[in-house]
Image: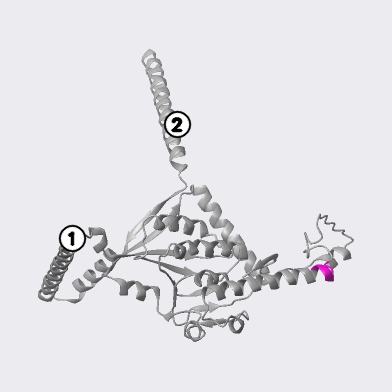
Amino acid sequence: MEFLSEYGLFLAKSVTVVIAILVVVGFIVASAHREKSKEKGRIQVTQLNDRFDEMNHVLKEAVFDEKTLKEEEKKQKEEEKKKKKEEKQARKNRKDASAEDTRKKRVFVLDFNGDVKASATEELRESITAVLSLAEPRDEVVVRLESPGGLVHSYGLAASQLARITQKGIPLTVCVDKVAASGGYMMACVANKILAAPFAVIGSIGVVAQLPNFNRVLKKHDVDYEIFTAGEYKRTVTMFGENTEKGKKKFIEDLEDTHVLFKEFVNEHRPAVNVEEVATGEIWFGKRALEKNLIDGIATSDEYLTSQHPEADIVAVHYEQKRKIQERLGMAASKAIETAFENVLGRLSQRHWF
């Protein structure tokens, strides 16, 4: 019994020490994680040239026999050797030029997948800031843009971020594979060149705002709804109050003025477009959009990027925000609820939408 008593005491001490060590280690790890999580995010860069070459090599291995594959590899090595020799000779002939002057053109590829709030604007902003720290006028930025539009102020900011590129004198190409409508097209028209797939949705240069009014329902159930404002037009129309003709008129005036600003924006960036003809809220598929000068060519983003290879260094740049797992789960749930709500009730807000 004495042995068991001593053994139990020893075991208790050992467990206490182990727990104490685990608590200390856990505290250190948690502190390090908190320090690390202070970083908002990081830039991720993917070399697309390597990806294209790898895809080509894998396909050749699957299709060619061993003899043909060896011949292809030999031919490729000879071409690379010849190219390097030509580049070396070019640098030699231009003694006053630095190696930087004879480098390949760089193509920076960014992605923007827009929702109604243009939530991807923050990632776009950071990516553009990173690219502008290196890009030169000889380079090019390609934005693969997909968006059906959304809030006016949100897409206005997103378009302004793209304008930072052209203001630096760097060529900007926007590729639309599926849809760039309303606010999405507002962003696209900032570019020097817009390319779209044959059936991509383009246009919808218009503004919409809609909301239900429950005032009669409230009156029926003897419910009073009071709203207090300072300023004649602080609140023109509401969902629960009684909307006056004066308030409705002012709201429509604001809507029309937003449409005018949208048309002026398109006209400024794409003077070849007959704005009055296309600013009807209609959409056009790729080929029809080309006829209206809303775009500059028919091509998918893949087609355009592969045409730049191997003459250019093509890199995809993406800013990834660091979020805790709780935040990621919360965002996913919030997005699902928001999407369901919008699908059922529509855009029930007095804010203006593109």
Query: What is the tally of numbered marks visible in this picture?
Result: 2
Depth check: give the residue in front, 343 or 87.
87
Question: Disc 1 marks which residue?
Answer: 95
| Local crowd size for mark 2, using a 10 Å CA cut-off: few (<14), some (14–19), many (≥20) | few
Q: What's under tag 1, amino acid-wise? A: Lys
Residue 302 colored magenta? no
Residue 294: percent from left, percent from top: 51, 80
Tag of residue 55:
none
- Boundaries of the magenta span: 243-247
Depth check: give the residue in front, 36 or 11.
36
In the rendered image, which quarter is residue 213 located in? bottom right
Depth check: give the residue in front, 30 or 304.
304
Q: Is residue 69 left or right of residue 143?
A: left
In the rendered image, which quarter is residue 352 located in? bottom right
Determine the residue located farthest toward the top in the rendered image: 2
In the rendered image, which quarter is residue 3 located in? top left
Residue found at x 26% / y 70%: 311
Question: Disc 2 marks which residue?
Answer: 27
Q: Is residue 32 left or right of residue 122?
A: left
Q: What's under tag 2, amino acid-wise? A: Phe
| In the depicted structure, whether residue 313 falls above or below residue 189 | above
| In the depicted structure, whether residue 1 falls above or below residue 291 | above
| In the depicted structure, whether residue 178 falls above or below residue 95 | below
Q: Quadrant of the C terminus?
A: bottom right
The answer to whether one can see residue 210 in this image is: no
